[in-house]
Structure formats: structure tokens, C-alpha cells
Image (cartoon, rainbow, N blue to C red):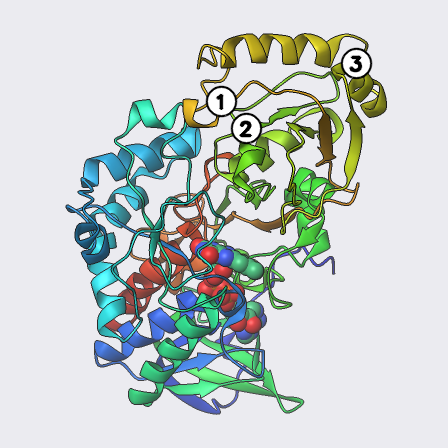
Amino acid sequence: MPASDPIAPLSSADIDHWDHETDVAIVGFGGAGACAAIEAADQGASVVLLDLASEGGGSTRLSSAELYLGGNGGTAVQQACGFHDETADMVSYLRESAGDNAPMDKITAYCEGAAAHFAWLEELGVPFKRSFLDERAVMALTDDCLLYTGSETSWPYRDLAMPCPRGHNLQVEGDNGGPLLMDTLASRIGDRQIDVLLESRVLRLVTDGQGVVGLVYRRDLKEHTLRVRRGAVLCAGGFVMNDAMLEHYAPALKARGTIKTGNPGDMGSGILMGQGLGAAVENMHEGFISLAFYPPVPLTEGIFVNAEGQRFINEDCYHGRVGAKAMAQREGRSFLVFSVWDEFKPPPYLNAPIAGTGETVEELEGELGLPTGSLVQTLQRYNECAARDEDPAYHKDPRYLRVLEPPYAALDCTPGHGAFVPHFTLGGLVTTVDGQVLRDDGSAIPGLFAAGRTTAGVPRRGDGYASGLSVGDATFFGRRAGRSAALRSA
Ligand SMILES: Cc1cc2nc3c(=O)[nH]c(=O)nc-3n(C[C@H](O)[C@H](O)[C@H](O)COP(=O)(O)OP(=O)(O)OC[C@H]3O[C@@H](n4cnc5c(N)ncnc54)[C@H](O)[C@@H]3O)c2cc1C
């Protein structure tokens, strides 16, 4: 069976005994699953939380755990740092950045509830410092909290919604947010005496013909049956590790990304189990793809050009937006052209090789193999406008507009040419704002819920992604799915 085929459920008629039972079973102990478990337990349900790994955490543990939160006047950190964040501005920003794919019901629910979600996390013991990091950074490597993690201050978004920093970084030095978030959630799960089954791979759901009544998992080389009285919640992550699914649903992502970002469990098993029961999927071709070309900040003063020597983006955007636009160029070819400065240091995350250097633009153009005159013209036009603090073509923020003087150099940002271009998937099961899994006809599958990257959530498009949207969405909608499952009548 191809690894992209739906996983057929088992009929309850074929089960002669249940090994154990629970109100709510949660498949996957990452950010979504942990929050689903806590909420379900707080509604009074008995909960079994299963994960195939020997430690909970999933990709959430591996992540920086930046959380994209705001609205309602602002989270406690936004307010303490002097930012006022209107829900309507956050809605506008997310709507515009998701474009035609914008899931307005989820965006609205998220923006209305994100500040309260921040308070919930803090109450659980997740620490956030009251500080703003005013830097162009991929993540805070200090213990500072608030930073811009999207394209809010860049064109066209700055004209469509009032910019506000919404990336919330945990209070921990270095890139260690994920472990701290998951350790804190695991500790609260321990307080609630939730039954955690590790090294337990869920193989398939069990149905009575209407909906979900249980599941089968493998542990210690044996298959076990778990009866589920109220609901099963699929929080099994995305499908970036499943090549057959990537080939089938997201071939461009497979072809252009160089490093799969996630954990080995990102095999799409939650999506496939849902599909086995008739669930609909959406947004399956989309993914986050990163070209982390900053810091150092002066590289933002450079220009990205494609194989035709043409610009294609305002370089002050978030690295994921630049990455998505770069991948859309012919054969994914892109170069970052910049003026060499005295203490040039390559961007630490990107690892892109120097593709050419030149005392003149002509020399650089030749070394890059660009059509004769193309880069010369592009740079001449760019420099003329930059000298007037203008960028009529792409509206780059004047803070980053500078005449590019020789000597020049260019980084080759083309995937497959050495640059580190990580990616993960953004498509999944279709769910309601309360986590119910839907069929193509819009009807809900009784007893089946899902959240996180197993679903198509708030983060919809690579070119509109902002850091913190995935963990924000997974933890926020994980809670809602856990609550819905717990409150469903047995
Ligand atoms: C290095 C890195 C940095 C990142 N930084 C950020 C960031 O700062 N902010 C942000 O928003 N996003 C970030 N992301 C993305 C983000 O971490 C993930 O998209 C998000 O955490 C997914 O959460 P989840 O709960 O859906 O899945 P996960 O956290 O991956 O949890 C899924 C769990 O399901 C388990 N599982 C899968 N299949 C089964 C099965 N059949 N049976 C039992 N268990 C199963 C897995 O073992 C896993 O533990 C980053 C990702 C990486 C890898």
C-alpha cells in the first residue's frame, strides 16, 4: 500500500475485547496533543495520551516555540512593552497574508482568543519576560520575549493593517523555547495524572460504522485496543517526512526544500487515519519554506535577483516569505547580491555559498552567469531609486535602502546549491474551529477531532507565514479540540 493511501479503520465488530478504555484518547504528545490533554482533563474527562516516541514533545520540542499572539488590546507582554494590538488589525494581517486560502473562521477565533491563550500558558507556568527585542532576527537568542516575526512592517502588509510585534519568545537564553515549553506542559500533564503511553504508535482508528469508538496501537511488539467513549483527537503532526505524500500532494515543496524540518513521526499518519474515515483534506500543496538570510542585518540592504537578473521581492520581508517567493522563480534560482562590508560574516543559518564576487557589476554578472546587462540594469535602477530613499518596484522599507557600491558579492540561495532551506507542511484535515473533523460534504465525523499540523489551520501559505503561527495555532486549537472531545456525550 503506498504510504500516501488513507489508513482504513477497523470495524468494532471485529474486536473481541478492549484492552482498556478512556473518555478521550489523544494521538501525539506534541504541542497540540499536550494542550488537548490538559483541556480535556480540566473538563473532567479521563484522558490517554499516546506517542510513538520515547519522550513527548514532537516537533514542538525541537522548535524555538515562538508563539504568534496578540489582539484584544495586546497580551500582557505587548501592553507592558507599550504596544496596543487591536484584534481587527491582527485579523487583517492574517487574512491578507493567507490570501485566497484565508480560513476566516479560524483566523477570527484565533485573534479573538490569542491574548487569553497567552494568559493560559503563563498560568500553566510558561515564562515570558516583559521585554521587546527591537532587532531583525529569526529568533531571540536572549531571554527577551517580544519581536516582529512576520512581514507586518513590510509592504504590502504595513498599508493593510497596523503593524504590531506578535512573536512571543519564552524566557530562556538561546534557541531553547521548545524544550522549555514541552517540559512545562508535561509537568502540568503529570499534575493531572493523565495516562501517558510512550513508545505507543497508533496504527488505526476503530469505527462502529458511524464514527470513532476506539483505536489500535502497538506497544512492546503487541497490538492493544483502546475503547474511546467520547472522542479521539488526532495531533500527530504533519507529513514532511513522508516522501510518498509529499510527492503526491506537495511536489514543489519536495523538489525545492532541502532539509525536512520536523520529527521522524511527521509521517502524516493522523491525516491518513482521518482520510480512512472519509475526512476531507485541504491546503495540502502548501508548506513553510525558509531562507534565513538575516542576521546580519546589512544583507537586507542587498537585493535578491533570479536567473534573469531581476528582483522579485522587497528584501525587508520575513525570511519565509522571501523563501516562498524565491522558490517560485524559474528552477528556484536566486542570488542575494550585496555590497561587501569590512567585517562581512555570512548568515549563520543559511549556509549559502558565495556564487560570485566583482569589483564591478559586470564582473559579478558574468560570474553568476546572468544574461548580459541584466544585473547591470537592475542594480542601476535600484541604486538610482535608493539614492532618493525610494523603491517604486517593491517598496522596501527606507531603513534598508542603501546605494549598493562595489565591491560586490552574491550568495547562491538556490536549493540544492548548498543553502539550508528547511521546510514543513501546512496542509491537513479539514476541521471546525472546535476541532471536529469534517467530511467533504461538511458533515462532522462523530467522535473524531484533530489539531496542529495534522489539520489545515491558521498558517496557510509559505509566502504569508510568520514565526510562531504553527505553535500558536497548534496549542490554541489543540485546547479547543480537547475540550470538544471531553464535552461530547458518551
Ligand atoms: C527546528 C524547528 C523550529 C521551529 N520553530 C518554530 C517556532 O519557533 N514557532 C512555530 O510556530 N513553529 C515552529 N516550528 C514548527 C512547529 O514546531 C511545528 O509545526 C508544531 O510544533 C507542530 O505541532 P504539533 O503538535 O502539530 O505536532 P508535533 O509537536 O510534531 O507533535 C506530534 C506528535 O505526534 C506523534 N505521532 C505521530 N504519529 C503518531 C502515531 N501514529 N502514533 C502516536 N504518536 C504519533 C509524534 O511522535 C509527535 O510527538 C519549528 C519546527 C522545527 C522543527
Is disc 2 in contact with disc 1, using a CB cutoff of under 8 Å? yes
Tell me the SS state at disc 1.
loop
Mark 3 is surrounded, within 10 Å at the Cα level, by few (under 14), some (14 to 19) or many (20 or more) other residues, namely some
Q: Amino acid at mark 3?
A: Glu
Q: Which mark is residue 335?
A: none
Q: Residue furthest left?
A: 73
Quarter occupied by residue 53: bottom right
Q: CA distance from mark 2 to mark 1?
A: 6 Å
The residue sitting at 42% across, 40% down in the picture is 150
Amino acid at pointer 1: Leu
Residue 206 screen position, x and y as percent: 49, 73
> Picture quarter containing residue 153?
top left
User: Which mark, residue 301?
Assistant: 2
Crowding at dot 2, Cα within 10 Å, few <14 / some 14-19 / many 20+, comes out as many
- Residue at 32% from the left image edge and 68% from the top image edge: 482
Whole-percent x and y of residue 254?
70, 45
Image coordinates for residue 155, horizontal then vertical, percent:
41, 24
> Quarter of the image containing the C terminus?
bottom left
Which residue bears the numbered disc 3? 362
Residue 339, percent across and down? 65, 27
Q: Is residue 61 left or right of residue 368?
A: left
Quadrant (top left/top right/bottom left/bottom right) for the N terminus: bottom right
Question: Which dot marks residue 401?
Answer: 1
Q: Is residue 129 above or below residue 53?
A: above
* First in residue order: circle 2 vs circle 1: 2
